[in-house]
Amino acid sequence: MNPQFPESTSGAAGPVSADARPDNAVSDSQRRRERVQAMIRRRQRWQMLGALLSAAIFLAALVALWHLAHEVDAAQLRDALASASLRQIGLAALFTVISYSLLTGYDFLALRQLGERIAYHITALASFTSYAVSFTLGFPVVTSGTVRYWIYSPKGLKAWKIASLTVIAGITFWLGMGCVLAWSLLREAPALSGLLYLRPSVIQLTGAGVLAVLIGYFVWVSLKRRAVIVRGWRLDLPGFRLSLGQTLLGAGDVCASAAVLFVLLPGGHGISFETFLAIYVLACMLGIVSHSPGGLGVFEATMLIALSQLSREGVLGAVLLFRLFYYLIPFVLALILLALHGGWSRLNRKSARTRTS
């Protein structure tokens, strides 16, 4: 039987148009479903691989930290914590304030890219609280996005714009990290060689690779307006000028946060700040990849291994103080500010209802 002339249920036969081919329509639909299912399976495999890699890094770091912690003398650790001078504590507090102040610029640039105007005190509140919470709890896309939604949605910002803002702010962070990492690897390769147990040429090659990726990104966003589409959601990427601003802002924030830990290290370590920057960024990246909240365990293990020539008690004491200044205190302050903001918002809504009634 000719497939273009299917048999009628009434016994008559007649031509049908090309658009009314049931067999072809079914086969096309089936092929589309198969392609979608294949894409889903590939995505699930990559997600599983990523989860396994994160778990492996986290477990390896915990094992390393466990062995290193067993060699730490508790009395010496207490002495290291108590020996922090007022100058060190004051500088750590100052650099923490500088870092979180620069973080408020992440949201400011993202809102500019989205064409939104929000009062700076609202931007600063959303940025500070979202980062203070996500740094401590982890899963930044979820935690920081949720906090931003609580603050920005009453100001008329739609959910998809808040999600876009979170992604653009994340790009600022990674551009800054990449810039600092490339610079420190290229400049301090000989000094890092002894700390990372790698040849200077390998370290410089890695730095050149990171720099090439950054340059490639700048060229890519400069040639024409770029956008990424994820599940039907379109995100327009910043152009050259805004990307440059993101990079400088992110680099300043990374340097300030690294300075918090650097000034808390025991004196006489002989490590330059540029050399320390590379170690700090690598420790942060491993902590992020592990998906451990705040890089807990992974960050400490990386620091103890990379700074093994220093007193372990001194390094661990500095890291614990760093956790206090950069994570715990801002986290508690963020929770207080969120509670006050929520109470003030409810009070304003109640007053508005009273006036209209």
Image (tube, rainbow, N blue to C red):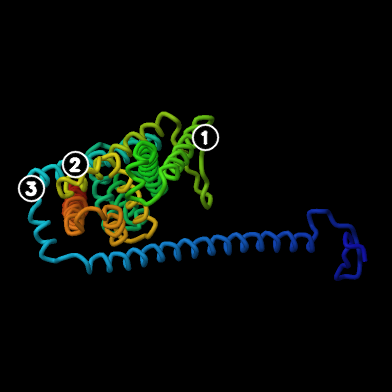
Which residue carries the number 1 mark?
220
Give residue 16's quadrant in the image: bottom right
Disc 1 residue type (three-letter):
Trp
Left or right? Give the position of 206 relative to 340.
right
Q: Residue at the spot x=17%, y=59% of the render?
A: 313
Residue 319 image point, x, y percent: 21, 55
Could you say whether the residue bearing mark 2 is in a helix, strand or loop?
Answer: helix
Residues at discs 2 and 3 in contact (Cβ within 8 Å): no
Disc 2 residue type (three-letter):
Phe
Which residue carries the number 3 mark?
85
- Name the one closer to the observer, 305 or 341: 305
Q: Is residue 357 visible?
A: no
Separation of residues labelled 2 and 3 (CA atoms):
16 Å
Q: Residue at the spot x=42%, y=48% of the render?
A: 160
Mark 2 against mark 3, which lies toward the viewer?
Answer: 3
- Name the one closer to the observer, 203 or 54: 203
Residue 317 image point, x, y percent: 16, 57
- Name the one closer to the observer, 182 or 201: 201
Left or right? Give the position of 45 relative to 298.
right
Q: Is residue 217 visible?
A: yes
Residue 11 image point, x, y percent: 91, 70
Relative vertical location of residue 231 with respect to residue 174 in this rendering, above or below:
below
Q: How would you rate the neighbour count of disc 1 (Cα within 10 Å): few for under 14, some for 14-19, many for 20 or more?
A: some
Mark 2 against mark 1, which lies toward the viewer?
Answer: 2
Which residue carries the number 2 mark?
95
Disc 3 residue type (three-letter):
Ser
The earlier-in-sequence mark between 2 and 1 is 2
